[in-house]
Amino acid sequence: MQRHLSSPLLQERLEYLQHCANQGYALTALRGLASDLLLIQNLLGLTTSSDSLGLADVQAAWADGSIVGPGTLGTKTVDAVA
């Protein structure tokens, strides 16, 4: 929990998780998403704002295998909407 609270972009991550909760995502799915958001943040080197993130950054992460496909990060599957 401390890792989530002390990492950059806390407010943005919380807002996205709240959006997903409002859409009916189960708690287990939200926990997985929270971990995935930190992984994405680290993979893309986001520290202050995703505004500086470009398509080339995402394509580079995709090309090196960090992001395998829709709904996955590496070999971890993101839980579906409940």
Image (cartoon, grey):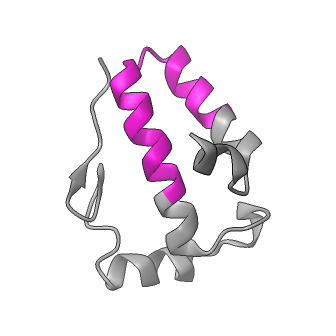
Q: Is residue 40 left or right of residue 81?
A: right
Q: Is residue 34 magenta?
A: yes
Residue at the spot 49% in from the left edge and 74% down from the top edge: 58
Name the residue nearer the viewer: 66 or 1: 1
How many numbered marks appear?
Answer: 0
Name the residue nearer the viewer: 54 or 81: 81
- Residue 60 picture location, percent across and down: 44, 84
Q: Quarter of the image containing the N terminus?
A: top right
Main secondary structure of the magenta stretch: helix
Q: Is residue 18 magenta?
A: yes
Q: Is residue 38 left or right of residue 51?
A: left
Residue at the spot 55% in from the left edge and 80% down from the top edge: 57
Name the residue nearer the viewer: 25 or 7: 7
Tell me where residue 61 sits by quadrant. Answer: bottom left
State whether residue 19 is above or below residue 3: above
Residue at the spot 27% in from the left edge and 30% down from the top edge: 80
Q: Quarter of the image containing the C terminus?
A: top left
State whether residue 61 is above or below residue 40: below
- Residue 63 picture location, percent across and down: 33, 84
Tell me where residue 64 sits by quadrant. Answer: bottom left
State whether residue 40 is above or below residue 33: below
Q: Is residue 29 left or right of residue 68?
A: right
Q: Which residues are magenta?
A: 15-38
Residue that protrudes farthest toward the right in the picture: 48
- Residue 67 picture location, percent across and down: 34, 68
Q: Is residue 75 left or right of residue 55?
A: left
- Residue 24 picture location, percent across and down: 43, 14
State whether residue 44 is above or below residue 51: below
